[in-house]
Structures are given as structure tokens and as C-alpha cells.
């Protein structure tokens, strides 16, 4: 697509915002290269990826890209045999670690909420743990080669440290001697050019042997290497050269490992850049309060409350516009500074954003089209260098557009026909509009010519629109009104500003009758529109209120039905338990009777015992279904007191409460029988004359320790913002699990992570004290915190 349209629509400013939200150099590079796509399926795929990233960011937060760097130059150099330095190798290791972390994060999210595009993309990342481990065994977090990188390097460094100790001991003995100390400027040992030296006063140079390596700025001090340690320094220098050669060997071996995996590493870098870019689009969507537009390729565009993304939210006026269904051309009229140009740019810029896979600042349900190209003639294109007038410049641009546009293009024209004679300009504008409209291109044009209002009214597929103007305040409202042509408002404005009535009357007399009828028609249409819009807003408000009431009633009804079903089920369970207990007791008594009859010869008839058992079985009520007959929901237990008349659900009998037995049961008189009944199994029928205070219970929450809760948190590789979020969550879990002490592993590195965590712990309400780890605990790479 033409770069000129990007400049006209200020598309690059959106790209700059997107680039700022990218966290890695790889993502920024991908964002900077973003351009609109003209294939519908490709656009849908780009938008789906943005939608999935937006879902991840909203539900779980975007993954952290800390530690991921652009490894492409280093990998390419390793592939052709160059040797990488420790910083480059460390960058490759941290990038591999970050890739593995992101891959698992997205896979975990995909299990909970499907994000197929992101999952398939991240799943292609290669997990190269052996290479990562090999680098980390040899290079520490400060990009220094470790002693453990090889046995030879460890031996050389032991020799180095021993040599340095012997030289220092020799020099210490020298500077403490009285004969030498008087010749020294300071009693200290320093280094110049990897050689140990001592500061000697310049006047003692002739008395002090050795090699001069440096002198102070004033010349009063000479830094001399005494003759007695020259051989020792030479030996130390040779050892350092051996160390450098061994480090070079180690780096070459690691570089060779990188070169073997070069293709996979380059691919991983590209995938990580794409993932960072996708999540940057999600963050931009959140910042702009954007929504996912529905896309089509049939030239249909419908914006609901579309907002220009570069205008501050508190100033922008949303527009509603539809194009490509009943009409394919919109002609917007209205006064200057009324917002016509902003409307054109909003339509063009939002179309470019959607075709780039970006959410657009509009309400849900908005639709946009994938055009093969967008053309615009907006603003003053006058070129002094080319000696072109404003009209000539506009015409040159329009001629270029006419030669390249197709039926699948979007054309935006501002102030069509301006800059020349009004009669000729309006005729030329109508001809251009007719040509573009007959070709089938989608078009939005702005103009001041009243002749174009009549053209739009008469031509099928063309509709008038205007920017609303408040005559009372003499200011535009910046609202787009589709279907209503704009009024000049010149007479109304002049009258409000105090122009003589006599002059105004004369001016009105100069206006033709036909023009006056058009103005009166427009005024009538606008008045009817305002009335209809007010009625629509009132109806919409009533509809929203009724919908809210309906939802609230449905929720309450569902809640009541659930409570009823639970109470019925509980009452039936308790009734069954009571009857089962009574049956067991009856069986025991019958067994005792049989035994007595056998022992004493009593004539207890067996058929009577069977009949009694049958009556007992029939006394058990059938359990009702949840959807059975409704009864009133039981009132809260606190309303039942001694002396109240109640209905016992499980026995389906009325009785009187004799006394309350605790907070959940009461003794109830049922005829000649007294029994304990749960308060949930009864309903108050009539209250007693006197009432007693209701006992209330207070539930205590006791925190118990969860054995599965971890006592340490590893934050290595994370940035400070991610780390603080994890630390806050980790402290809450540890506090709720009664852990006394926790370990936060942040590594040594540059110290940014350690300092940020220390500042955060110092202010946290659950932290009693904190310190750096001791020997054996991780040293300065670990912070140990004690919980309150």
C-alpha cells in the first residue's frame, strides 16, 4: 500500500505506540515492519492472534519476556566460525531460558482457556536445555567465565591467586620497613598495566631501583615496580596469558555448540519476536479500549461509536457510520472546523488498523472491510516547489487516485472541487463523484457545495451526511449525522453575532425560493431527527432498565428455588433418619417381645407383630423431588423462640416450642410427644406473646499450614515488574500457610532485582525482617525474609 496514505492517516504514529509496547528488540523490529494486509483470511488470522493474546493478558497477564535478547547477529557469526564473547553466549542462554518459560506459560493457559494460534506458534520453540546448561556451567550471570569451566582454567586461576598473594606479601614486607617507607608517598600497593607497583616520592628515584610504570599528574609520585618482584610479575603475566588462551578455548567450544544449533536458534528468535509483537498488540488494544472488529471483503463498513485513536479520550467525539450496504458513497457537508476531516481520517485509520490485525477503538459489533487499497486526498497539498496552486495540487492527486483505484478500494476526498470557481468546481466534483460511484468503489467525500446535496439526494446509492452544529452556542458538536445534509447556518450565526436585521432581510431576499425551500426542508429534517433521537434514547433507557430488572428477578428466583430444594432435601433426609432410628427401636422391642413370649409362653401373635412392622414402614414419607410442590422458604432460625407455634416439615405436624436447645435445635411439643427438632426443619406459624433475644454464633477462621506451599521463590531471569507481582503473590500464600521464613532467589546480576525486592519487602505489612543469604544459603543472590 502507498506510503503516502500512511502519512496522511498518521498510521505510523499508531505503529510507534505499538513498538513502545514491545518488550524485546525482536518484537520492536517486527512491530516497525507492520503493514496492512489485503487478504481476508490473513487479516482474520492476525486478528485472532491479537484476540487470543488479549484474552491471556486479561485473564492471567501477559508472559514476561525478560532475559530475551536479539541473538540473530551472534548466531550468524557462530555459524560462520567466529568466536562469541561471554556476553553474547550469556544472551543466548537467557533467551533459551525465556523461550522455555514462555512456551510453558502459553501451554498452561491453553489448557484452561483455548488459545490455539498462540499455542501452535509457541509450541514450535525448540527446548535446548543442554546448550543452555552448557553455557551456564561456564559463564555466570555477570558474563564472567567460571573457574569450573575447565579443570585447566581452575588450575591456572589457583596459580594466579597464589602468585598475587606472594607478590603482595613481598611488597607488604618492603613498605613496612623503615628504610623504604620514608621514600613512599603512601604505604599502599597498587597496579599499573597488570603489574604490582608502589608509589615512590620523585626525589628518591635515584635511591630506589626498579622499573617506573607511571607517575602522578603533578609528577611528585612515581609508580615503581621494585627489582625484587620483577621476575614474580613476569611469571604472573605469563600465567594471565595462559588464562586468556584457556578462556579462548572454552569460548570456541561453546561457540561451536551454538553453531550446531544455529538454524533452530534463528527460528526461535523469529518466533519470540512474533509472540512479543502479538502481546504488544494486546497491550495497545487495552490502552485504546479497542474491540475485535468483524471483517469482510464485500465492501461493507459499520462503525459503532468509532473514536480516533490519536485524540485524547476526554476530547474525542465518537461517530456512527455505515457504508457499503444501501449506499456506497457518503457526501458530508457542514461548516469548517466541524470535524469533517477528522471523520475521514477516523474511517481511514481504523480501516488500516483492522487490516493490520489491530483492535479498533469502537464498540462491539463494529464491522470493517479488507480493501485492496485506501486512497485519500486530504488537507492542503499545495506545492510551492512545483509551482502548483491548491486546486492543481488536489487535482493531480485525484487524477493519480482515479488511475489506480478499483471497485474494492476505499476513496476519501476532502473539500472536493475547492480552490476554483464555485460553479465549475461543483460541476467537476459531481463528475468525479459520479465516476467513482459508478465504478463501485466505496467513497466518503466532504464538500461545501450545495449542488452536491441535491446530487446525493437524487442519486441511488449516495447519501447525504453532515456534522452537527449548535446554533445556540455557535459551535460544532463534532457528531456525524448520516441522512441529513448540512445547513449553512450563515444567517443564524450572523444574527447571533449582532448583524443588522435590515441587512439580514435583504440577504434573505437574494436567496432563491428553491434554496430557501431546501434550507427549510433541512431544518425540518433536523428537528424531526432530534425529536426521534430523544425518543429513541428514552426508549433505550427504559429497555435497559427493564432488562436489568428481568435479570435481577431471574437471579432471585433461581436463588429461591435452590434454597427451597436444599431445605426440602435436608428435611427429607432428617425425616428418613428419624424414622430409620424409630424402626430400629421398634425392631428391638419386637425382638424382645418374641424372646419374652418364648421364655414365658406368652401368646403374642406373630401376625400382629408383622402388621405392626407394616404400619411402621408405611409411616415413612416418600421423598419429594426438587421440582415438587413449592412451599414458603423457611424463615431464618433466629425468628423461632420459646412458646412459638411451628410447623415441623419432616413430620408434617404442628407443635409448640417448649425451649431452645442450643443454636440449631429446639424441643417441640407435638401432641403428647416431645422431641428435639432442627430449627431448619420447622417454620414459624404464630409467634409467642413474649420474645427472647436470639443467640448468635461467631465463626472463627483458623489458618492452617498447607504442606504443599513452597518456601522459596526463584525469580532469576524475570524483570523487576514481573518479579514484584510474583513476590506479592508468594508472600500472601506463605502468610496464609503460617510459614515463618521464606527464601527469594533473585541472583546476583546487576543488583536491580535485589534492590527492588528489598525496597518492596521493607514496606510490606506481612514482613517482620529480611536479610541477604548467609554462606550456604546463596549469599547475595538470595534474600531471606521472616514473616510476622
Image (cartoon, rainbow, N blue to C red):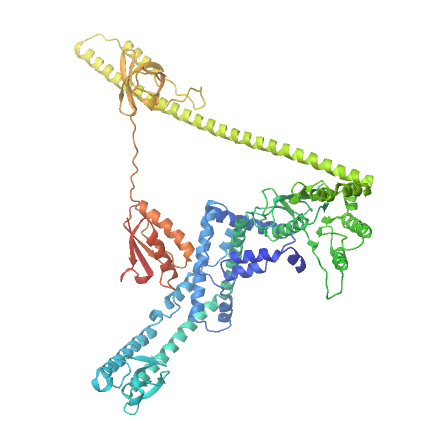
Q: Is residue 146 above or below residue 543?
A: below
The number of discs equals 0
Relative image position of residue 164 (x, y in whole percent): 29, 78
**170 w.r.t. 129: above or below:** below
Tell which residue pokes out farthest to the top in this image. Answer: 603
- Residue 459 visible at all: no
Q: Which residue appears at 20% of the width and 14% of the height?
A: 595
In this view, the residue in front, 52 or 744, is 744
Q: Is residue 647 left or right of residue 383?
A: left
Percent x, y of residue 466: 70, 44
Given the current orientation, which residue lies at the most extreme bottom position? Answer: 206
* Residue reaching furthest to the left: 600
Residue 759 image point, x, y percent: 35, 56
Q: Is residue 122 visible?
A: yes
Instruction: Note whether 464 is above or below 222 in the view shown.
Output: above
* Left or right of 501 on screen, residue 86: left
Residue 590's spot in the image, x, y percent?
Answer: 24, 14
Residue at (79, 43) in percent of width and height: 507
Q: Nearer the viewer, residue 265 or 332?
A: 332
The residue located at (27%, 13%) in the rendering is 673
Comparing 494 with 170, the one in front is 494
Q: Is residue 261 left or right of residue 360?
A: left
Q: The N terminus lies in which quarter of the figure? A: bottom right
Residue 334 vs 86, above or below: the answer is above
State the residue at coordinates (45%, 65%).
Answer: 92
Amino acid at each position: 500500500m502507498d506510503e503516502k496514505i500512511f502519512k496522511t492517516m498518521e498510521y505510523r504514529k499508531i505503529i510507534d505506540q505499538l513498538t513502545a509496547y514491545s518488550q524485546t528488540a525482536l518484537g520492536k523490529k517486527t512491530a516497525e515492519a507492520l503493514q496492512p494486509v489485503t487478504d481476508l483470511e490473513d487479516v482474520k488470522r492476525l486478528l485472532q492472534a491479537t484476540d487470543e493474546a488479549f484474552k491471556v493478558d486479561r485473564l492471567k497477564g501477559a508472559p514476561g519476556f525478560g532475559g530475551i535478547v536479539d541473538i540473530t547477529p551472534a548466531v550468524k557469526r557462530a555459524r560462520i566460525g567466529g568466536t562469541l564473547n561471554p556476553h553474547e553466549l550469556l544472551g543466548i542462554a537467557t533467551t533459551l531460558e525465556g523461550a522455555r518459560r514462555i512456551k510453558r506459560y502459553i501451554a498452561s493457559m491453553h489448557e484452561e482457556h483455548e488459545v490455539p494460534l498462540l499455542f501452535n506458534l509457541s509450541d514450535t520453540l525448540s527446548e535446548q536445555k543442554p546448550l543452555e546448561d552448557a553455557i551456564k556451567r561456564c559463564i555466570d550471570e555477570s558474563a564472567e567465565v567460571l573457574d569450573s569451566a575447565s579443570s585447566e582454567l581452575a588450575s591456572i586461576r589457583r596459580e594466579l591467586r597464589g602468585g598475587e598473594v606472594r607478590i603482595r606479601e613481598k611488597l607488604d614486607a618492603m613498605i613496612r620497613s623503615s628504610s623504604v617507607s620514608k621514600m613512599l608517598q603512601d604505604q599502599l600497593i597498587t597496579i599499573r598495566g597488570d603489574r604490582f607497583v608502589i608509589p615512590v616520592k620523585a626525589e628518591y628515584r635515584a635511591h630506589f631501583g626498579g622499573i617506573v610504570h607511571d607517575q602522578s599528574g603533578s609528577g611528585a609520585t612515581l609508580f615503581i615496580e621494585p627489582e625484587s618482584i620483577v621476575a614474580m610479575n613476569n611469571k604472573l603475566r605469563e600465567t594471565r596469558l595462559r588464562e586468556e588462551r584457556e578462556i579462548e578455548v572454552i569460548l570456541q567450544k561453546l561457540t561451536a555448540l551454538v553453531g550446531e544449533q544455529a538454524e533452530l536458534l534463528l527460528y526461535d528468535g523469529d518466533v519470540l519476536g512474533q509472540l512479543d509483537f502479538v502481546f504488544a498488540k494486546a497491550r495497545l488494544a487495552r490502552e485504546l479500549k479497542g474491540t475485535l472488529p468483524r471483517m469482510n471483503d464485500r465492501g461493507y463498513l459499520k462503525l459503532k461509536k468509532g473514536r480516533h485513536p490519536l485524540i485524547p479520550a476526554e476530547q474525542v467525539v465518537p461517530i456512527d457510520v455505515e457504508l457499503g450496504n444501501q449506499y456506497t458513497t457518503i457526501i458530508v457537508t457542514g461548516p469548517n472546523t466541524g470535524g469533517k476531516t477528522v471523520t475521514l481520517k477516523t474511517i481511514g485509520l481504523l480501516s488500516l488498523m483492522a487490516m493490520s490485525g489491530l483492535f479498533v477503538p469502537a464498540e462491539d459489533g463494529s464491522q470493517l472491510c479488507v480493501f485492496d487499497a485506501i486512497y485519500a486526498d486530504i488537507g492542503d497539498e499545495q506545492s510551492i516547489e512545483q509551482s502548483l496552486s491548491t486546486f492543481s495540487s488536489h487535482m493531480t492527486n485525484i487524477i493519480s487516485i482515479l488511475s489506480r483505484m478499483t471497485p474494492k478500494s476505499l476513496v476519501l476526498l476532502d473539500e472536493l472541487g475547492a480552490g476554483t470557481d464555485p460553479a465549475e468546481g461543483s460541476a467537476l466534483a459531481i463528475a468525479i463523484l459520479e465516476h467513482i460511484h459508478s465504478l463501485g468503489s466505496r467513497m466518503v467525500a466532504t464538500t461545501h457545495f450545495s449542488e452536491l446535496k441535491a446530487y446525493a439526494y437524487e442519486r441511488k446509492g449516495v447519501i447525504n451526511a453532515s456534522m452537527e452544529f449548535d446554533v445556540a452556542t455557535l459551535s460544532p458538536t463534532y457528531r456525524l449525522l448520516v441522512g441529513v445534509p448540512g445547513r449553512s447556518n450563515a444567517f443564524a450565526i450572523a444574527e447571533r453575532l449582532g448583524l443588522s436585521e435590515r441587512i439580514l432581510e435583504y440577504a434573505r431576499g437574494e436567496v432563491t425560493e428553491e434554496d430557501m425551500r431546501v434550507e427549510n426542508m433541512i431544518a425540518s429534517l433536523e428537528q424531526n431527527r432530534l425529536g426521534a433521537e430523544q425518543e429513541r434514547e428514552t426508549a433505550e433507557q427504559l429497555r435497559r432498565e427493564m432488562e436489568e430488572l428481568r435479570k435481577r428477578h431471574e437471579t432471585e428466583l433461581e436463588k429461591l428455588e435452590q434454597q427451597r430444594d436444599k431445605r426440602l432435601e435436608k428435611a427429607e433426609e432428617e425425616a428418613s433418619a428419624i424414622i430409620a432410628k424409630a424402626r430400629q427401636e421398634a425392631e428391638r422391642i419386637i425382638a424382645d417381645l418374641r424372646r419374652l413370649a418364648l421364655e414365658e409362653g406368652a401368646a403374642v401373635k406373630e401376625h400382629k407383630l408383622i402388621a405392626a412392622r407394616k404400619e411402621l414402614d408405611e409411616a415413612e414419607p416418600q421423598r419429594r423431588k426438587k421440582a415438587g410442590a413449592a412451599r414458603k422458604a423457611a424463615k431464618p432460625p433466629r425468628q423461632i423462640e420459646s412458646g412459638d407455634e411451628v410447623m415441623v416439615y419432616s413430620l408434617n405436624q404442628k407443635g409448640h416450642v417448649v425451649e431452645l436447645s442450643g443454636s440449631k435445635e429446639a424441643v417441640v411439643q407435638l401432641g403428647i410427644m416431645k422431641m428435639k427438632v432442627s430449627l431448619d426443619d420447622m417454620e414459624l406459624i404464630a409467634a409467642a406473646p413474649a420474645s427472647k433475644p436470639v443467640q448468635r454464633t461467631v465463626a472463627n477462621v483458623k489458618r492452617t499450614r498447607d504442606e504443599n506451599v513452597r518456601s522459596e521463590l526463584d525469580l532469576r531471569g524475570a524483570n523487576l515488574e514481573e518479579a514484584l507481582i510474583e513476590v506479592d503473590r508468594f508472600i500472601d500464600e506463605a502468610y496464609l500457610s503460617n510459614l515463618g521464613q521464606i527464601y527469594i532467589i533473585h541472583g546476583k546480576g546487576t543488583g536491580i532485582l535485589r534492590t527492588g525486592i528489598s525496597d518492596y519487602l521493607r514496606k510490606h505489612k506481612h514482613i517482620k525482617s529480611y536479610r541477604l543469604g548467609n554462606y550456604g544459603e546463596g549469599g547475595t543472590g538470595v534474600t531471606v525474609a521472616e514473616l510476622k
